[in-house]
Image (tube, helix red, strand yellow):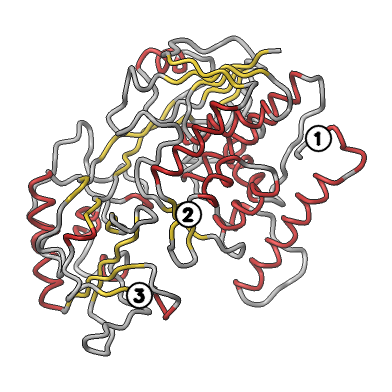
């Protein structure tokens, strides 16, 4: 039995891994490095294009619960993330290059996964997972667009700049996580006058032209900093530049605003500007971001960029296992399905790979219910009503507890506990020993 996975991003690698560990031969097709997209910078698998953070690692937070569910289910992406993590407080951030290398090594060394460097131009007829991402090549995108019952939607993503650590002025920048929880982040504090000058500079900076972009088609989690500034003077100060939980050691007081920088690698030689996704021209990024105290002489190792993302209108097109309703045996996975986020994309690859493997082996499907975060995301993709939009992991996707629990944090922890118990029972049920998670 032979399966095809198209795309070696996080979702594709996860799908290939889940198929192979269930004894299915997999051909993994990846068009890089022969053909690159505007967003990608390396030829590596599972490349992290935007931030190097996979967000919260706490089970009482939506993304944290999703990670723990995937750990229980043998996720390659979570294994790689845990092995290559860099300090980031309560978040799971990784060395993006080590992360990519870890995933690629595991994929290439698996005896049942065969990597082919080629562009796939048409949707296969069966036994396939399509995980080509929101920047799918034109030929394959046209083939997907022609599938019955499908419409596609678009929005825009942006990436934040990365600066060299040794170019920062550490007399102005200080190490500290919020509320004294370690010193994983660097912070560039601003007084009110500095903030206002920076705000005005952002409003008047020249953006790079992006075809079709009018400032409204952005995913809120990746909003360009200049778009945020245009919404009002204090929007940034209540967003990525909020000073809450920080004390400037020079003054002993909380600053008016602060820019946080998070390490990109274990050696802490590179830092990204947290929440500073942008589409400004590169010269403008250098000019405006150098106004941040401590970044006056910053060396920009990578400037921020913006690119268009395309996703499917999945309700009515995909099932809760990410399988095409009109073409059984063909699955989609990743951000193109309408899940938003690194881990969310990988979770869809896990479900698609597991589901295709079971289908090829003549086993019944496993439906992850909305008692779990994995199931909540899958249910959103398959069943969402109204204006379908990309979705991050959040507790609104999970069925509420039957009993009333006071306090949001306590309620979310109870929901997380129920979810993990459900996953564990699914894995260990002696009547389901063919499930083969381990």
CA separation, marks 1 and 3?
45 Å
* Quadrant where the image shows the N terminus: top right
Whole-percent x, y for residue 311 in the image: 44, 32
Q: Which residue is mark 3?
A: 176
User: Which quadrant of the structure image shows residue 305?
Assistant: top left
Left or right, 419 with respect to 344, comes to right
CA separation, marks 2 and 1?
30 Å
Whole-percent x, y for residue 330 in the image: 61, 19
Decide which of tag 3 and tag 2 comes sooner along the chain: 2
SS state under label 3: loop
Query: 412 or 93, which is in the foreground?
Result: 93
Q: Which residue is mark 2?
A: 85
* Quadrant where the image shows the C terminus: top right
- Vertical arrangement, residue 37 with respect to residue 421, above or below: above
- Vertical arrangement, residue 111 with respect to residue 340, above or below: above
- Residue lying at 8% horizontally and 52% vertically, measured from the top left: 205
Q: Which residue is mark 1?
A: 435
């Amino acid at each position: 039995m032979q399966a095809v996975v198209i795309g070696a991003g996080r979702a594709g690698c996860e799908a290939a891994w889940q198929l192979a560990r269930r004894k299915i031969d997999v051909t993994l097709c990846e068009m890089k490095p022969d053909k690159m997209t505007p967003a990608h910078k390396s030829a590596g698998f599972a490349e992290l294009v935007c931030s190097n953070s996979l967000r919260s690692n706490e089970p009482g937070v939506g993304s944290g619960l999703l990670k723990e569910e995937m750990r229980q289910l043998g996720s390659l992406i979570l294994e790689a993330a845990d092995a290559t993590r860099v300090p980031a407080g309560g978040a799971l951030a990784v060395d993006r290059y080590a992360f990519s290398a870890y995933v690629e090594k595991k994929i290439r060394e698996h005896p049942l996964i065969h990597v082919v460097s080629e562009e796939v131009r048409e949707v296969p007829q069966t036994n396939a997972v399509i995980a080509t991402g929101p920047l799918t090549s034109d030929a394959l995108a046209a083939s997907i667009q022609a599938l019955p019952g499908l419409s596609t939607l678009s929005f825009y993503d942006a990436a934040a700049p990365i600066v060299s650590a040794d170019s920062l002025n550490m007399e102005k920048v200080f190490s500290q996580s919020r509320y004294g929880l370690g010193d994983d982040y660097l912070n560039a504090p601003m007084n009110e006058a500095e903030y206002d000058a920076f705000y005005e500079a952002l409003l008047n900076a020249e953006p790079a032209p992006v075809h079709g972009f009018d400032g409204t088609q952005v995913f809120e989690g990746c909003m360009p900093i200049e778009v945020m500034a245009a919404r009002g003077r204090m929007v940034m100060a209540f967003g990525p530049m909020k000073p809450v939980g920080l004390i400037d050691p020079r003054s002993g007081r909380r600053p008016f605003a602060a820019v946080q920088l998070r390490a990109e690698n274990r050696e802490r030689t590179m830092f990204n500007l947290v929440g500073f996704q942008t589409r400004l021209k590169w010269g403008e990024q250098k000019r405006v971001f150098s106004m941040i105290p401590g970044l006056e002489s910053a060396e920009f190792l990578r400037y921020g960029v913006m690119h268009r993302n395309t996703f499917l209108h999945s309700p009515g097109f995909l099932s809760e296992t990410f399988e095409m309703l009109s073409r059984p045996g063909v699955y989609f996975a990743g951000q193109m399905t309408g899940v938003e986020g690194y881990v969310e994309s990988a979770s869809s690859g896990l479900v698609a790979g597991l589901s295709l493997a079971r289908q090829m082996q003549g086993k019944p499907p496993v439906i992850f219910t909305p008692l779990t975060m994995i199931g909540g995301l899958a249910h959103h993709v398959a069943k969402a009503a109204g204006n379908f939009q990309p979705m991050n992991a959040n507790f609104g996707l999970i069925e509420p507890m039957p009993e009333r629990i006071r306090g949001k944090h306590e309620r979310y922890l109870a929901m997380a506990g129920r979810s993990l118990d459900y996953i564990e029972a699914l894995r260990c049920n002696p009547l389901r020993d063919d499930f083969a998670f381990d």
